[in-house]
Amino acid sequence: MGKLVFIGCGLGDDRALSLAALDALRKADEVVVEFYTSRPVGCTVEAWLHEVGRRTAKTLRVLSRHEVEGGMGALLA
């Protein structure tokens, strides 16, 4: 059984992520993000996804509003 880690995106663009957050993202088997409850400030969602993906060498899966509000089922699947 793996570990589920929640990381806050910070209060700005991709540079607002802490070094610990970037390290956790790099170590993750899968990265799932949501922008329904909070959106990046100072850049577009697309730019944030591109830069974080580039800095972590990860493909980021974006949850839809329905998946966020639908409970943990979509996330855990």
Image: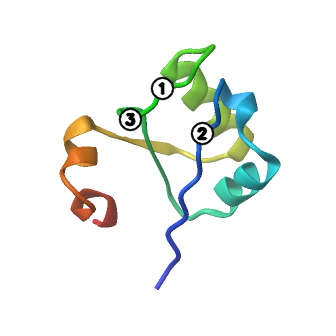
**Mark 1 is on which residue type?**
Arg
In what element is the residue under mark 2?
Answer: loop
- Give the residue type that dot 3 points to: Thr
Q: Is residue 25 above or below residue 14?
A: below
Report the colour scheme: rainbow
Disc 1 target residue: 39
Establish if 52 lies above or below 25.
above
Measuring from the top left, give residue 64's x and y in whole percent.
28, 37
Q: Hey, what amino acid is under mark 2?
A: Cys
Residue 57 location (% of width, % of height): 67, 46
Badge 3 element: loop
Residue 14: quadrant of the picture:
top right
In the rendered image, residue 46, in percent from the top left (x then y), is placed at 51, 21
Label ID, residue 8: none
Q: Earlier in the sequence, mark 1 or mark 2?
A: 2
Q: Residue at x 71, y 39 (%)?
A: 17
How far apart, in angstroms, are the residues tagged by discs 2 and 3?
11 Å
10 w.r.t. 77: above or below: above
Labels 1 & 2 near each other (Cβ < 8 A): no
| Residue 19 horizontal side relative to residue 34, left or right | right
Which residue in the protein does label 3 denote?
A: 37
Q: CA distance from mark 1 to mark 2?
A: 9 Å
Task: Quote the CA–CA distance across marks 1 and 3.
Answer: 7 Å
- The residue at the point 76 percent across, 56 percent down is 23
